[in-house]
Amino acid sequence: MTREALVDLDAIRSNLAVLSTATAATPAMVIVKANAYGHGAVPVARAVVEAGAAWLGTADLAEALELRAAGVAAPILAWLHEPDVDFAPAIEGGVDIGVSYPQQLERVAAASGRAFVQLKVDSGLGRNGADATQWLELVEAAAAHQRAGRLVVRGVWSHLANAGPEADAAQIATFTEALEAARAAGLEPELVHLAATAGALRVPASRFGMVRLGIGVYGLSPDDTPVPGLTPAMTLSAPVVAVKHVPANHGVSYGFDYRTTAPTTLALVPVGYADGLPRSASGGAPVAINGRTYRIAGRIAMDQVVVDVGDAPVSVGDRAVLFGDPAMGAPSADEWAAAAGTINYEIVTRIGPRVARRYRG
């Protein structure tokens, strides 16, 4: 039984090139957090570094150190830290540490070795990052630690909320003021970055000296506007493992939310919510078999879904494609997101470890 996520590394390299052109060749940090949005952190990291990524980004230090253990030597930033995390392995591994508040800075400065840090300001998103009441304290303390040789401030950064032009402009202004305050404190950050994929594409003023590219690298648009030239990199598929002919008014899956309207053929596909399919997409998400697209019949179960294929000639062993590249006739992750009432990020990122990753390119 092979549940498979086929990841096209050539598509990822191509997507990075497309995004580079669209962002005026601004240096890019490619985000490979959450196992590279489900695509596989180590293979993706190697591919994008080969393709010209200047930096890699992970959420936490464990993700960054996994890349180091695999021999990935490119610069890495990690920014989401538990209160008691040990920063010493990151410092030893040459991983830049994102710092969001003064007490966190003190813990980094007290760790063994000289850390490279990137200070994050909350420019309005309301998540990580020092707010206006903390920022001056943070940059002044960072400057003092840098003068003492305990750390080096390599960057200043933040994150757009993508809440519209007025909100973007307000965040850019807040970020610019924070950057000026950091410089006034004696810091000269080498890296200045605010925009992720959406901002990098839509708001040129947000690009500064580097952009962070996440979902676009995987071939998916960060919003409802498709980005020309991107190719979805992941194709999720599984074999048909059973076929049966049933009469009209036959119930399908738990609760009999779906009943057949005529004599028909049901195909069983062994992938379910334990593999990351959103159960909320039951009864609406697409599945392609032998070049034709159908809808899942009834509820998505833990390990399997049922597809009503009508009178189509479907056999055990035929490949069912749940999502992939629409240009190749596959349903899209966006269609699955629409069926589940979510976003394409979640569709690819939640694909679980029972699904084997295979790579080409």
Image (cartoon, rainbow, N blue to C red):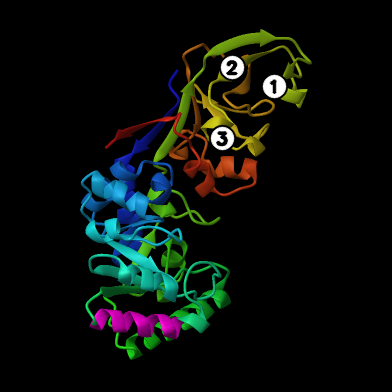
Labelled disc at residue 267: 2
Residue 138 coordinates in the image, percent (x, y):
41, 80
The residues tagged by marks 2 and 1 sit, at their Cα atoms, a distance apart of 12 Å
Name the residue that disc number 1 marks.
253
Disc 3 packing (10 Å; few <14; some 14–19; many ≥20): many
CA gap, disc 2 and disc 3: 17 Å
Q: Residue at x 26, y 61 (%)?
A: 91
Q: Earlier in the sequence, mark 2 or mark 1?
A: 1
Q: Nearer the viewer, residue 327 or 347?
A: 347
In front here: 24 or 64?
A: 64
Which span of residues is magenta-colored? Answer: 135-147
| Amino acid type at image mark 3 | Leu
Comparing marks 2 and 1, which lies closer to the viewer? 1
- Principal SS element in the magenta part? helix
Name the residue tied to disc 3: 277
Decide if residue 207 is in sight here.
Answer: no
